[in-house]
Amino acid sequence: MKMDSRVKTLLIFVITILATFAYAFMPEEINITLKQIDVSSLRPDTAATATVTPADTAHVESTKAVDERNHNILFLGDSMVEGLMRRFADYAKENGHQLDVICWYGSNTSVWANTGTLKHYIRKFAPTYIVVCLGGNELFVRDLPQRDKNIAKIVETIDTIPFVWISPPNWKNDTGINDLIIKNVGKTRYFDSRVLQLQRGKDHVHPTFSAAAVWMDSVAVWLSGKDTEHPIRMAWPQATHKPHSVSVHAPDFKGFQ
């Protein structure tokens, strides 16, 4: 008997959620290797060095020195967060940062701008640094004026907290969402993922976990470099770690009010 497509989709989502929570909350003393990326063979001077400086920001330099403080980092966004957070956790832990992750599958700038979800998590975690990864579900939208307002509202909500925005890793040319992100956040807060050549999974959209690790290596180099508005400590990690916390929301989540 053929499985109903809706049931199949639900089962896939449930399995993904369970795997994400198992990874995030399994005790440290258990030696888990499932989906964990082995990057020990990579070196800081060879890991995606040709792609760590986004093309659109190559000549825009920050005058600020690296902030050596330990930060409470809030990392939020759509399903692209799932791949990035694994390697991001390595960097955060070994550089003295606390990483709290919000992965809202299927989310976009509209739901983050027009619900109280962002304010909720800012109150909950009191971040001193925010990393946003949104736009992957809006590559082909046509209502650009509304998306412009959404991004502006997200930036307004973040207020004075230092932040950066990781762009979606385009698999096709977008209709303008990346230009709107740059317009609202500025080039020194924008990491251009479009320049990366990333191996994709079976959906031909999401980078594989190993590719996402290299993607995050590139982001980390940029985060601590002269092209970033508020550079922070992101030295190359020597071990694997887990995020401080992971919150997962399904695509049908309505957001906090």
Image: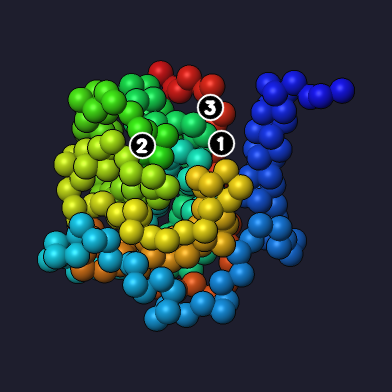
Spatial CA span between label 1 and label 3 = 10 Å
Give the mark nearer the N terminus: 2 vs 3: 2
Going 42% across and 79% down the picture, which residue do you hit?
Answer: 46
Q: Which residue is mark 1?
A: 248
Q: Which residue is mark 3?
A: 251
Q: Nearer the viewer, residue 131 or 160?
A: 131
Going 46% across and 55% down the picture, which residue do you hit?
Answer: 98
Residue 36: mark = none
Q: Nearer the viewer, residue 80 or 155?
A: 80
Mark in the foreground, 2 or 1: 2
User: Quadrant location of residue 58?
Assistant: bottom left
Residues at discs 2 and 3 in contact (Cβ within 8 Å): no
Give left or right: position of 189 versus 18.
left
Going 41% across and 71% down the picture, which residue do you hit?
Answer: 48
**SS label for mark 1:** strand
Q: Position of residue 106 (x, y in %)?
A: 49, 31
